[in-house]
Image (spheres, helix red, strand yellow):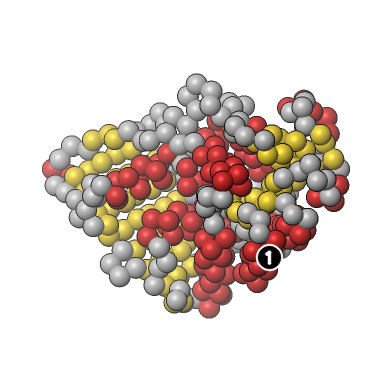
Amino acid sequence: MINVALIGYGLAGRVFHAPLIAATEGLRLHTIVSRQHELILQQHPQVRVLAQAANALADDAIDLIVIATPNALHAPLAMAALERGRHVVVDKPFTVTLDEAERVAACAQRHRRVASVFQNRRWDGDYLTLRQLLQDGTLGELAELHSHFDRFRPQVGERWRERDEPGGGLWFDLAPHLLDQALQLFGAPQSLHADIAQQRQGARGADYFHAVLRYPRLRVMLHAGSLVAASGLRFAAHGTRGSWIKHGLDVQESQLRSGLLPGQAGWGQETAPAQWVDAEGSESPTRDLPVAPGDYRQYYAALRDAILHDTPPPVTVAQALQLMRLLELGVQSSAEQRALPCH
């Protein structure tokens, strides 16, 4: 049994990490570091609650540290945990700079511990469906992929994620999801052209981005906005054999927010099918295609096996570094208003 200490009990810790850890065989949610003592004991009465991260890091009963704090704390906490001999999971993004990410990677290698970043949306049902369609050739040769993560939040929130600070803003919040999926599907692009902006009145951090990843033939468009009321599109994939269109986000986040526990009836089951239009286009009726079930628990199950059996972690340090390079390149591209090579 792997004893886990979760540092942070905001959105990421409370909604995602705590229930997923608790639902994964072989992991024990042992400690949560937070000042929300009463709330935590209501939701997880079996855990120990600590107010200071240092106390969890120093406890030799802890095997794995999960870091779900503001992004600027990711690197220092990860390195402190690794130096204590703990394995580490960091919520995305891995760090706020490539230099920090490289130092965490070196620390993990030096201490021979598993370090990984939580890219849960590799286990979204719609992403898994798209991956299968590409693998089996249903789409033919892909020409365009549009990947959206839009919201309608006209009011600027009082959250660290919306402030102009290291690791703040929508580019560091949502781009790690979309970039990671693109990298897993297609590998490194030839170039990246990003437009990162503030669109809302009173915005203090980026609340919009549009990025184009250029491959020899394929173009991948990644988009997120905060003023998109008709925010239905998730994927639009256009290939030589037809188009696959998916609306709405994977259901697991909304299920977790509503209190549905991983593994309960309906977990990860998409209710709305995706649409398929074949190569004859409008002359052929649109067909609905089922979406595969998603399951974020697969991340923690693979992490457990990496710790116990020395298998590759679900997200490797090399993959985390590749993503951090693209995040930094996107900031530079937007500032210079031009496409930048990725090699």
Q: Which image quarter: residue 214? A: bottom left
Q: Is residue 172 above or below residue 278?
A: below
Number of numbered discs visible in the structure rendering: 1
Which of the image's four quarters has the N terminus? top right
Q: Amino acid at mark 1?
A: Arg
Residue 267 picture location, percent across and down: 50, 28
Which image quadrant is residue 187 in? bottom left
Residue at coordinates 47% horizontally, 24% vertically from top-left?
A: 266
Asked if residue 299 can be seen in this view, the reply is no
Question: From the viewer's perspective, is residue 195 above or below residue 295?
Answer: below
Residue 262 position (above or below residue 278): above
Viewer-proximal residue, 170 or 73? 73
Q: Is residue 132 left or right of residue 68?
A: left
Is residue 242 visible to the viewer in this orientation of the structure? Answer: yes
Residue 241 locus on image (x, y percent): 19, 50
Q: Identify the residue shown where x is 55% and y is 39%.
A: 301
Q: Residue at left 52%, top 35%?
A: 252
Which residue position holds label 1?
110
Instruction: Pick out the residue farthest to the front.
Output: 309
The percent position of residue 126, horizontal first and vertical second, equals 40, 41
- Is the residue marked by circle 1 packed among few (<14), some (14-19), or many (20+) residues within 10 Å? few
In the depicted structure, whether residue 103 falls above or below residue 291? below
- Pick whichever, 340 or 300, lies toward us: 300
